[in-house]
């Protein structure tokens, strides 16, 4: 099927589109004017990004990590490709890179994502409040690394 590789600058226009379109479709608590393409650049600054590309080399999903803190910041899949196991493959790829513990934040209203992360063995370790998105959960995954 597809493959995972590190994102290059020339991939960013497509990744911006995936990010914005997925947020428009699933982040019902945000107003349309709050979703702009430039958010991708602002939010992924200083992060490492891996993308999943289809057999034609077209990016269809990505994961971004702020490596100094092993913080998974973004995980987005193109709307037409959701439910095909791509997010699972991206997380498994990341975890297989080494015995690293990861954290992330998940907006409480995003019940689909929360359920997904819990199925991927993330545990809720705390919660907080974001002025824009409301309540969120802090999640933790114990790194397994390669066996």
Image (cartoon, helix red, strand yellow):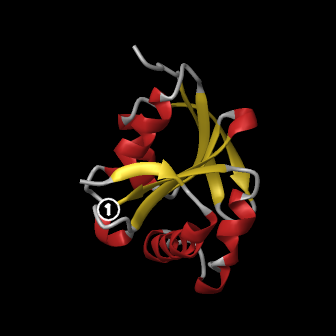
Residue at x-position 62% and y-position 49%: 136
Q: Quadrant of the C terminus?
A: top left
Q: Which residue is mark 1?
A: 54
Residue 56 placed where, x, y %? 31, 67
Residue at x-position 60% and y-position 81%: 31
Residue 77 visible (yes or no): no
Residue 23 placed where, x, y %? 51, 71
In the figure, is residue 127 to the left or right of 62? right
120 shown above or below 26: above
- Res. 90 image quadrant: top left
89 shown above or below 22: above
Residue 29 placed where, x, y %? 56, 71
- Front residue (pair 29, 60): 60
- Front residue (pair 56, 145): 56
What is the crowding at mark 1: few (fewer than 14 residues within 10 Å), some, or many (at least 20)?
A: some
Residue at x-position 69% and y-position 50%: 47
How many marks the image carries: the answer is 1
In the figure, is residue 22 to the left or right of 13? left
- Front residue (pair 133, 97): 97
Residue 24 visible (yes or no): yes
121 shown above or below 138: above
- Front residue (pair 43, 139): 43
Residue at x-position 59% and y-position 60%: 8
Label 1 residue SS? loop
- Res. 74 image quadrant: bottom right
Residue 123 placed where, x, y %? 50, 29
The outermost residue toward the bottom is 33
In the figure, is residue 137 to the left or right of 58? right
């Amino acid at each position: 099927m597809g493959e995972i590789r590190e994102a290059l600058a020339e991939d960013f226009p497509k990744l911006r589109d995936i990010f914005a379109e997925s947020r428009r479709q699933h982040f019902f608590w945000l107003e349309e004017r709050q979703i702009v393409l430039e958010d991708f650049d602002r939010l992924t600054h200083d992060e490492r990004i891996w993308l999943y590309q289809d057999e034609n080399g077209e990016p269809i999903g990505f994961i971004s990590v702020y490596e100094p803190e092993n913080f998974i910041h973004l995980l987005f899949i193109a709307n037409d490709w959701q439910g095909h196991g791509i997010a699972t493959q991206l997380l498994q790829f990341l975890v297989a890179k080494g015995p690293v513990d990861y954290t992330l934040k998940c907006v409480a209203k995003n019940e689909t994502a929360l359920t997904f992360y819990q199925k991927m063995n993330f545990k809720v370790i705390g919660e907080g409040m974001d002025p824009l998105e409301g309540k969120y959960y802090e999640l933790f995954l114990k790194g397994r690394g390669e066996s």
